[in-house]
Image: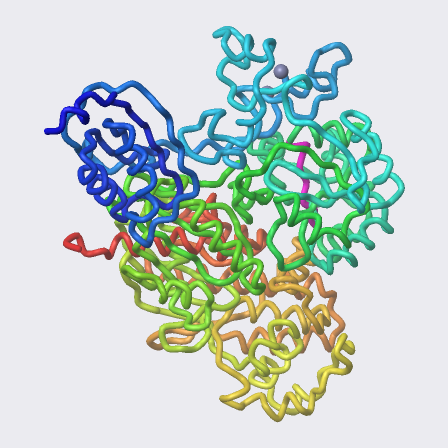
Amino acid sequence: MPVVEECKAIHALRVTLRGRVQGIGVRPALARLASGLGLSGAIRNTSRGVQIIVEGAEDSLSAFLEGIGKCLPVAACVEELQVQHGEAEGRTGFSIETGGPPDVLAVRVPLDRVACHDCLAETQSTDDRRAGYAFTSCTDCGPRYSVIRTMPYERAETGMASFLLCPTCRKEYESPNNRRFHAQTTACPACGPRLWCCDRSGRVIAEARHAICAAAETIRRGHSVALRGLGGYQLIVDATSRFAVESLRRRKRRYGKPLAVMVGSLEEALGIAWLSEKEQELLTSAAGPIVVASRRDDGVLAPEISPGLATVGLMLPTTPLHALLIQECRRPLVVTSGNNEGEPLAYRPEQAIDRLHELADVWLEHDRPIERPVDDSVVRVIAGRTAMIRLARGYAPLPLRLESRRPGIALGGHQKVAVALTNGAQAVLGPHVGDLNTLASRERLLEHITALSQLFGFEPDRWVVDPHPEYFTTRWAADRLGHIASVQHHHAHVVAGMLEHGWLDREVLGVAFDGTGYGSDGTIWGGEFLRATATGFTRVAHLRPFRLPGGEKAVREPWRVAVSLVEQAAGLEAASQLRFPVDVNGSADLAGLLRMVHSKRFSPLTSSCGRLFDGVAALVLGTGASQFEGQPAMLLEAVCAQEEPGVYSLPIRAGDPKQIDWRPMILAVLHDLAAETAPGVMAMRFHRGLARAVAQLCRDYQPLPIVLSGGVFQNRVLVELIVENLADLAQRLGLPGLIPVNDGGLAAGQLAAAIASWDPRD
Ligand SMILES: [Zn+2]
Ligand SMILES: [Zn+2]
């Protein structure tokens, strides 16, 4: 051995690689490189990435660093490479440390929490050092999921990393008796994020507290403010101003869909909506969701907030920034996600400037980065339970009671997409991503999949999708390497309900009512009764199928459905008598529609309950066009005259599968229309009739537990009527809960169904 080598000093390096580096052969590749260079040391996966310690001569260490890029497997993607120098410990040989189970994240990711009372009191006091400071937080409150880069949750791994604690904050952070002992997101005006207000050209017009005053002034004048919130940009306008709300709708191209309102206090909320105890509890909870509640007629809100609806979505300030702003505005505010309708929530400053330029007049900005976009959650109390409408801030990632040693990701469907995953140590349902109609939203989904799998420390190679051949998620997964499973849409809905209620090991009767789902026979399903286990199902009953004249077009133009229903129930003559208001596209071409109503090619068959609601709404309310999916059903629910005892008949026809026949109901509606019956009465009779038919069918399959699933069951009137009808079976009735019953919960059901059917041998 050459003497000169032995004289060389021995050094050590600690190298950490982050990014897509685990589970794809990175460790063996680096071990080979190190051994080849005569270095000793060890390599292991940690929840933060791959960590290598190498010891040896300086030139070999340099060669090692240079060689890393070239030796890695192609699937690897290093986003960050950290090199620390250290003292050699005299290691011999090179080892790959496995140390038991793979190093995936077993701990839960903490959830974002709204500002606590103590923090709000400090920001609103006059003498506290955090008076007026918008980024006040403590161990009880503040951003979590939205600021975490990697787990474990420590300041250095969050968006707060670049804000070094000042001596006073440091002291609080280190004092065991302080409320901010180890509060990872703590900050103060001296050391934390800064706030400013700028105009559309980016010119700063005010800073710190003055920025809040400037933004408030803009809002009071009827203009809109883009605010960088906790999980993304939000658009804010005066909720009492008709002008402000209408102009926001126009600019955002959001027509008809209800807007959420933020109020300063619970007292203020009680002046706007009728709130049950449970609703008040949700409103003031640490998760701080938007609570959909009955709107008071005598409130101060502009009617354009939720046109045609009897409800309003309310929330309290979620961060000190919101609290300070609303205090300055002294009125309720519309707070809606910062995006054009259909696009994903903007959360990076460069995206926001680009996408929100036409939507906002003034910007309330700060320099705390948002690491993970997350919308506000939306909940509704139905039959005394919390029913999740949109799972996001404060609730997501939602832990799922699923066990699997194999990692995998379920991608949901096409609308309201959220993904569910298991990394082998835990399973969760991720936050709402959105509809996948735009390129931007598809890109956001892919970004989100990568970000979530990195957070949970695994490399997915098992995918679970909807069998719909046209869904983006289905087609995208088909191009992945690995194992792909598909789970029928309504089965996934039912299994999500089984998971919600801890019934995965049982057989249930699942009622899956929604808008559209790809059926096992290639037709469009959506009014299904499935006798189901976690791994399979039999379709035991469904709504009598009807034709959707114009296919997809019928979703936007419910009058088409009405014509089809009437034609089948009462004949061509009755259908040709129907009159609908002229829609935005000109006039309703009734004659043309009647010619194609039986066309197999242009009028696909469906058993969809969502579409049945559309058709009935068109008849009862004269709704010619729908501004968003589900709107006709929401309008129909809103007009229900709850004291009306009448019931339309929807008889159950024998057969295999059985069918719920809606034709007598349509005939009764026509009769009531001719008698000029009030729409609220007809709407209620329809809800009662459908609830009775559902209950009747469910009784046939006793003692199976019953699961209500699918977006139709966001309808409070319908669910509560079913509960009333099945009061004696309350223990066996699985109602909507924290896993959304709409497509936002689909992925949870897909994942649970796939795990139950994965062969233990592969
Ligand atoms: Zn706090
Ligand atoms: Zn400080």
On screen, residue 754 versus residue 362, left or right, reads left
Quadrant where the C terminus lies?
Answer: bottom left
Count of labels in the image: 0
Nearer the observer, 434 or 79 = 79
> How is the structure coloured here?
rainbow
- Residue 668 spot, x, y in % from top left: 62, 75
- Which residue is painted at 43% across and 49% down in the image? 450
* Residue 195 located within the stretch drawn in magenta: no
Answer left or right for 106 relative to 697: left
The correct choice, above or below, for 236 with respect to 533 in the image is above
Q: Does residue 509 lie above or below 147 as drawn?
A: below
Is 313 colored magenta in this rendering?
A: yes
Residue 272, percent from left and from top: 75, 39
**Residue at 63% in and 19% down:** 191
Left or right of 762 in this view: 473: right
Q: Note whether 250 is above or below 393 in the view shown.
A: below
Q: Position of residue 295 (x, y in %)?
A: 72, 45
Q: Residue at x 62, y 57 (%)?
A: 343
Quadrant location of the N terminus? top left
| Percent position of residue 677, x then y | 73, 69
Determine which quarter of the picture holds residue 128: top right
As displayed, is residue 163 above or below residue 375? above
Q: Quadrant of ligand 1?
A: top right
Q: Residue furthest toward the bottom?
A: 595
Q: Is residue 298 visible?
A: no
Q: Which residue occupies the extreme right position in the image?
A: 221
Could you tell me if residue 197 is visible in this image? yes
Residue lying furthest left in this view?
A: 1
Magenta-tinted stretch: 310-318
